[in-house]
Each structure stands twice: as C-alpha cells, then as structure tokens.
Amino acid sequence: MKNILKVVLVIIGTLIGAGFASGKEVYVFFNKYGSYGLYGMILSGIILSLVIYKVLKLTKNNKIDNYKELITRISEHKKINKILSNIINIFLLMSFFVMVSGFASYFYEQLNINSLIMAIIMAVLCLVTFNRSIDGITKANTILIPFLIIFIIVAAIINGKYFIDNYNYIDSIFINTNSEFKIINNWIVSAILYASYNSIILIPILIGLQDIVERKNIGKISLITGFIFIILGISLYSLLLRGQSHIQYLDIPIISIMNQFGSAYSNIYGIVVAIAIFTSAISAGYGFLENFKNSKAKYKNMTITICGISIFIAMIKFSYLVEILYPIFGLLGLIQIILILKTKKVLKK
C-alpha cells in the first residue's frame, strides 16, 4: 500500500499544478459552467483515471522507456508521431518556463521579493531535483503533496455550510458571468480538454514510474488517483463559490477567497500555491528531459540549459497559459488520448 500511495502522490502532484491550486483552472474549466461544472470535474477525473490505467498498462507490459516509444506503439503514422512528439515537447518546455516565472512572480506579488532572486532559487531547486531523475520527483511529491491535499480538503470542509446554503444559486452566480475566455463554451468539451492537456504533462511521468509500479496495483492506482483528483476539484469548486463573479478577474482567486477565512489561511495557502508551482515545474521539466535520458551527458547538459534559460523568462504570467494556451494544447492532446484509449494490439499478457 505504501508503494501505491507513493505513485498516487507523484501523479496528483503532476495534476494539481499552479493553475489548479490557484483556482484559475477550476474557474475557467468548471465553475463558469455553474452546476454543470461539477459534472465536468467528475468527467475529467474519470478520463484521467482511464488514461493513467491504460498508459501504465502499455508501458509496463511492453517495457516502454520513453515517450517516443509510446507514440510509435499507439500510432503507425510517422508524420502524426513526429507532430505529436514535437507538440508535447514544446508544451512541456513552455510549461516549465512559465512555472518558474510564476514562482518568481508569486513571491514578488505576495512578499515583494525580487523576481530574479526567486527565479534563480527555483531554477537551482529544479536543477537539483532533475539530477536525481524520477527519484527526485517521487521524493519531492511524497513530501509536499500530502500537505497540499490536506489543506485544500480541510478548507473545503470549513466552507461546507456556505457551499450547501448557496448551492441552489450556483447557476445564477457563475453561468452568466462575463468572461473574455471564448475558446471553449461547453462544459463537456471543457472537461475533455482539461483532461487532455493535463495528460500531456502526466504521460512522461507515468512512463518514468513504471519501474516502481507493480502490474497488480495499476487498477488501484488509477482509481485512487481519479477519486482524490475529483475530491480536490470539487473542494476548490466549492471554495470559489465565495468569490462569486469577481474571481474571473484574478490570477490567483483562491488567495483572495482565503482572506475571508483570515490572514493565517491566506498565508498558509500561499505556501500551498508555491508548492503546486514547484511540483508543476519539475513534472513538466522532467517530461521534457526524458527525451535525453538515454545519454547522461545530454541529460545533464540539457538540464543546465533549460534551468538557466528559465531564469531569464520571468515576465510571463502563467494565467495566460491557463486561459489561452492550455485549451489549444488540450485540443492537440486529445489526439493522443484517443490513440491511447483505443490501443489494444500492443497489450501483452
């Protein structure tokens, strides 16, 4: 059971990144659809659970060592394989850069700490973690993610009465709010796209986890992860109800809502957001670096390169990525999900 929880925590740490913990993703993809957003959250959780199950089965049964091998297994079209591979690598690298930038910007906005200093600190932390490969990712998530999960759920429980009392007004509060976000306008499509773009970062991590995953536990891992993800999603959804229509204008709406509980909650949740940004960064960065893991020299050089470059990309706001780029990559990642879920012939007994 200990090994199962370790794997689950790594996966959860990959899924609940900066956009999720900040509340921005949950609002854009779920709350804005009112009560239907709750169904959307459940749908996303089910899709992600299926993807986790199928990818772990594919990688474990076929000894797939990297993302390129997975793509060649699920598709026989070389052009599609190349396009998918390039798109995913661009997204992973971009996500890593934006997470480092988000980390620096967050500390500047909340504590007025120089962005460059925090970008350097973040880059060094990532560099150390990457040099420990998947073991570093596993240990970081095992230590940090339980704190994040517990705090979100506890805050939602405290907020429980408010959520129940205002449940009947959800549609009037959210579904008619004006938003500049026009790429998606359907709760089902939104839920699918959410699961789709999250799978882009998730799949390389799943491939890296195959050595510590036992075949008999794959079903349990996928179910537990899906359940925790849905619970966390609904928890944040309920908390965002306190923000009503003004949250659409905030980059980190949950911090504003936590202020309603008191400054202590706001400060603690600030730590939660910082943790989420860090786990997102290492997951995205590792996913990109996995392409170079067959050569220790290339892996090390590329690690230093991307961590170094990330320091200079400190002006990009992660909210832009959440609102514009994520749905676009979600559409592209949908091709990947379809190919994975329909794959049967590569499964070995």
Image (cartoon, helix red, strand yellow):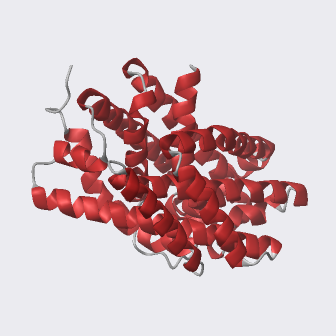
- The residue shown at (82%, 59%) is 266
From what the image shows, is residue 97 above or below residue 85? below
Image spot of residue 36 (x, y percent): 50, 52
Image spot of residue 207 (x, y percent): 37, 40
Q: In this view, does 296 lie to the left or right of 318?
A: left
Furthest-left residue in this view:
77
- The residue shown at (78%, 49%) is 162
Image spot of residue 288 (x, y percent): 40, 58
**Image quadrant in which the C terminus is located:** top left
Frontmost residue, 42 versus 338:
338
From what the image shows, is residue 309 above or below residue 121? below
- The residue shown at (30%, 40%) is 65
From what the image shows, is residue 249 above or below residue 231? below
Image spot of residue 16 (x, y percent): 57, 50
Q: In this view, does 154 lie to the left or right of 63?
A: right
Frontmost residue, 68 versus 202:
68
- The residue shown at (47%, 28%) is 221
**Image quadrant in which the N terminus is located:** top right
Frontmost residue, 152 versus 95:
95
